[in-house]
Amino acid sequence: MSVSSSTPRYKRVCLKISGEALMGSKEFGIDLDTVERIAEEVKQARDLGMEICIVVGGGNIFRGLQMAAKGMERASADYMGMLATVMNALGLQNALESIGVETRVMSAIEMTAVCEPYIRRRALHHMSKGLVVIFAAGSGNPFFTTDTAAALRAAEMGCDALMKGTQVDGVYSADPKKDPNAERFDHLTYMDVFKQDLKVMDQAAIAITRENGIPIVVFSLADGGIHGALTGSGRFTVISDN
Ligand code: UDP
């Protein structure tokens, strides 16, 4: 879907940024140039009057499931994964604040020396004041993903959309990097995603957004992608019931 406009399509959004998106072209960790670019695009959208919260992943540092597959106890590995998201959240906070965007990091696992604990009503207050709230430590529970945490926070914050940044400019029937015949969709229903088993977000995340009528906007995190999706001027797939 491509809409030519620089006005925001939604007033309040939850932006899901995976840990991998922060790596840039690196194999691991955080690429500062990439984080700065992402921060700049978030700032542009914030300057248009949007209320933005961000759920950040941790896959660039640690993935619980991968370590569990190597023999580590799953719950402990997942807690390590959640701690990785806190590092990313602090990196993103630093990049945003260095360009004048006031932020709060709120962690689902209490860590009061480095950030605020997640308190829903306080987060809502920050958002209504125009602060960018970065949610760290996922849902605070093992056996979940940050995609599910993003759906949860989007519902709790009363967001108008859940914006899911990926490597490509929307949802395809197959991986377009591997299959040149992959079909790209402008719009899908939640049921399409379930029935066709499309790899967009995990099923728990889809279920939460569907139950709460929150559209998912899938877009590319490449240069300009965040701004394009937030304002509607870029290319993206919308998943909703209508
Ligand atoms: N995680 C978790 N519970 C949550 C969110 C995340 O246990 O609510 C753990 C899980 O181990 C996951 C890791 O944190 O592998 C990093 O999150 P995720 O893989 O979702 O990050 P992303 O793929 O977005 O970078």
Image (spheres, rainbow, N blue to C red):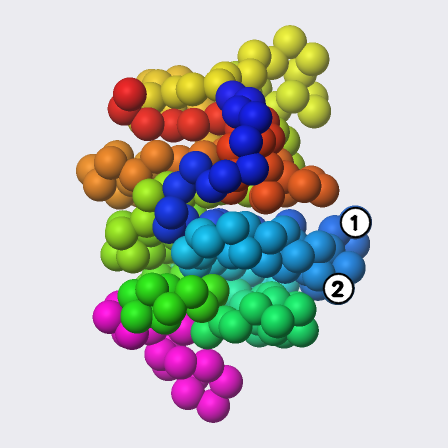
Percent x, y for residue 184?
A: 55, 16
Q: Amino acid at mark 2?
A: Leu
In the picture, residue 212 is in which quadrant?
top left
Q: Any mark on residue 91, and which? A: none
Q: Taking 125 as reference, is 64 left or right?
A: right
Percent x, y for residue 2?
A: 55, 23
Q: Any mark on residue 25, and which? A: 1
In the picture, residue 9 is in which quadrant?
top left
Q: Is residue 111 magenta?
A: yes
Residue topped by disc 2? 32
Q: Amino acid at mark 1?
A: Ser
Foreground of the two, 16 or 161: 161
Q: Residue furthest left?
A: 211
Q: Taking 2 as reference, is 33 left or right?
A: right
Helix, strand or loop for disc 2 = helix
Q: Residue furthest bottom?
A: 113
Is the residue indicated by label 1 positioned so its CB lies within 8 Å of ligand 1?
A: no
**78 versus 209 height, above or below:** below
Q: Residue at x 27, y 52 (%)?
A: 158
